[in-house]
Amino acid sequence: MKRQLLFILLPSMLLLFAFTIYPALYSVYLSFTNEALTGVGALRPQNVGFRNYIRLINDTKFWNSLLVTFFFVLGSAVIGQFLLGLASALALGRSIQFRRVFASIILLPNAAPEVVAGFMWISMLAGGEQSTLSRIVAFFGITPADWLNTFPLAMIIVVNTWRGIATAMILLMAGLSTIPQEIYEAARMDGATPSQIFRRITLPLMMPTILLYMLISAVSTIAVFGLVYALTRGGPGGATELVSIYIYKQSFTAFQLGYGAAVAVIVLLITLMLGVFYVRAMKVEV
């Protein structure tokens, strides 16, 4: 029986090792070298010890990318996607009109690939009076702006929130479905108001699902690349340079694979610490 189980799991384990574990270990190895795509580092890469990590500590652009990533994750995943996803899940849990249409509209952003969605939003947020958003605000008497240059971080937060509402909604709806209806009926019979039911029953019983969503959403948002790169390329002036874009630029624009790998290893450690924090939080009884 154990051999059969191992035989069944072997293909998945091989794929996990080939596409996740080995690249991570190889990145750790690269981070201690001066590996590059051009120059001496490409011909004769050498071990440089902790030189890349020392350089990273003194790199203001790296710290800026971490700060931008923090606000991006906080605004789009922790706040935007969660609040709108929870509201959508609660709405779809009720008998509302056009329920299927509402659900389809929320799921629609996931139908477009990341880069396609990015170029679509470029046409909406472009400068000048002809962009979609400029026409909308002009209708209400507001002066149009070059949205991606004037409010770059806010705009990419809005776009990523729009794209991630469906995932939040599906996961939170699954959490809502596990709450027995008898608890709600008993609370109503005791005279509890809808706000009291939500604060004292729904939220506490959904806390494991909410923490699981926060973990998945935060980790996936840290890794967002194509959507933001298509929108702003990390500009203007590094205002939207997420750590994923910074790693790409260091590795494939500046051709410094070793230094880019060092940044990736730090991000991996931060992600692991975040995962440990959420896993420990999920063990707390509610």
Image (tube, rainbow, N blue to C red):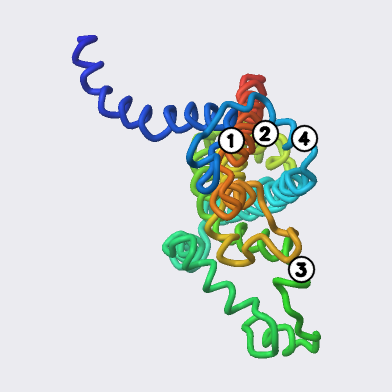
Answer few, some or many: residues within 10 Å of disc 3's Cα (few below 14, many 20 plus, some between 14 and 19).
some
Res. 52 mark: 2
Q: Position of residue 241 (x, y in %)?
A: 68, 55
Cα gap from disc 2 to disc 1, whole angstroms: 8 Å
Amino acid beneath label 4: Ile
Instruction: Give whichever of 157, 58 is nearer the camera.
Output: 58
Residue at position x 70%, y 58% in the image: 240
Amino acid beneath label 1: Asn
Q: Secondary structure at mark 1?
A: loop
Cα gap from disc 4 to disc 3, whole angstroms: 29 Å
Q: Is residue 225 above or below residue 113?
A: above
Q: Quadrant of residue 227?
A: bottom right
Q: Position of residue 285 (x, y in %)?
A: 65, 20
Q: Please tell me which of labels 3 and 2 falls first in the chain.
A: 2
- Left or right position of 247 against 200: left
Q: Quadrant of residue 51?
A: top right
Foreground label between 4 and 3: 4
* Disc 3 target residue: 151
Instruction: Give whichever of 60, 95 is nearer the camera.
Output: 60
Amino acid beneath label 2: Asn
Residue 85 appears anywhere in the view? no
* Disc 4 target residue: 57
Q: Please tell me which of labels 4 and 3 falls first in the chain.
A: 4
Q: Position of residue 60 (x, y in %)?
A: 80, 46
Residue 9 appears anywhere in the view? yes
